[in-house]
Image (spheres, helix red, strand yellow):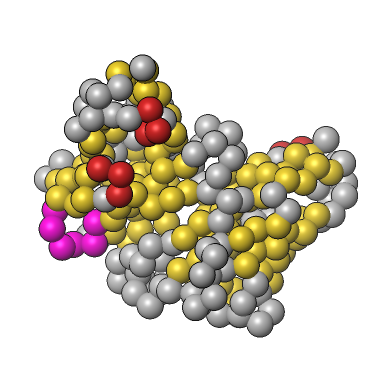
Amino acid sequence: AQSVTQLGSHVSVSEGALVLLRCNYSSSVPPYLFWYVQYPNQGLQLLLKYTSAATLVKGINGFEAEFKKSETSFHLTKPSAHMSDAAEYFCAVTQRETSYDKVIFGPGTSLSVIP
Amino acid sequence: DTGVSQNPRHKITKRGQNVTFRCDPISEHNRLYWYRQTLGQGPEFLTYFQNEAQLEKSRLLSDRFSAERPKGSFSTLEIQRTEQGDSAMYLCASSLGVLAGNEQYFGPGTRLTVT
C-alpha cells in the first residue's frame, strides 16, 4: 500500500532563509508525486508534480523538489523564504498504471516564517 | 474557467440532521473526487466519479454518506443523521484524469460543524 510521511509537523524559518520540507513515500510501483499548499480556510493548490520526467521539478512561487528513488524521497525546497510562504504543505503520492488517480496525502507540515 | 466551486462554504448543523454539499468541477474535467480533512491532517479520499459513474468508495464512507453526480457535471455529497465525528472540511477536486497522475484541482471546501 502506498503511504507518505512528512518529517516535522511544524517548521519555522526566518524570512530569507532556506526552506526544506521533507517527504518520504512508499510505493510498490513508480509513483507520481505532488506537493500541495493550503492557506487558511482555503482548498489545496498544486505547487509542483513529478511524473517521471526530470528528477528535479520546478514549481510555482520559487519552490522545487527533487525525486530521489534510492532514498524514496521528494523533499521540497525554496532558497529564500517569504512571509507569504507561511501555510500548510502536503506531500502526496498516486500510483501510475491504475484506472484512476487516487491520491494519498501525507499529514502535512505547517510552515511559519519569522520576520 | 472559474475553478472548482463548493457550496456552502460553512455549515453548522445539529447532531442527527441531514446535510448536503454541492461541488461544481471545472467544466471539461470528467473526474471528480471527494475528500475529508480533519484538523491537522491531510485530506483523506472518500469517493471518486468518472463522468456519472461512482467508481471507488473508501471504507471511510459509511452508509450514512452518499454521493451522486447525476449528469456527470456537478456532484452532491449527503450525510444523513450527522454525528459530531463528521465535523471536518469536505473537499472536492476535479481532474481531466485521462492518465493517472493528472493533477487534481481543489475547491475551497465546505467546513461542517456538528453540534
Report whether residue B79 is seen.
Answer: yes
Q: Position of residue B29 (x, y in %)?
A: 49, 75
How far across and how far down the image is residue B14, in percent? Answer: 87, 41
**B99 relative position to B109: left or right:** left
As drawn, B80 above or below B51: above
Res A32 → quadrant: bottom left
Quadrant position of residue B15: top right
Name the residue located 57 percent from the left edge and 68 percent from the top edge: B25
Q: Is residue A102 visible?
A: no
Q: In this view, does B1 lie to the left or right of A54?
A: right
**What residue is at 41 percent from the left and 73 percent from the top?**
B97
Q: Nearer the viewer, residue A78 or A35?
A: A78
Q: Is B109 left or right of B78, judged from the image as shown?
A: left
Q: Does the magenta stretch include residue A51?
A: yes
Which quarter of the figure has residue B67? bottom right
Measuring 61% from the left and 50% from the top, which residue is drawn there?
A: B109
Q: Which residue is pictured at 37% across the width and 17% down the height? A: A114
- The region drawn magenta spans A50-55
The question of residue A85 being in magenta is answered with no
In the image, B15: left or right of A46?
A: right
Between A61 and B24, the one nearer to me in the picture: A61
Q: Main secondary structure of the magenta part?
A: loop
The quadrant of the picture occupied by the C terminus of chain A is top left
Front-lying residue, B112 or B62: B112
**Residue A52 horizontal/vertical position (percent):** 18, 62
Q: Which of B107 and B52 is in front in this view?
A: B107
How many numbered circles does the render carry? 0
Place of residue B40 in the rendered image (x, y in percent of width and height, measured from the top left) = 53, 32
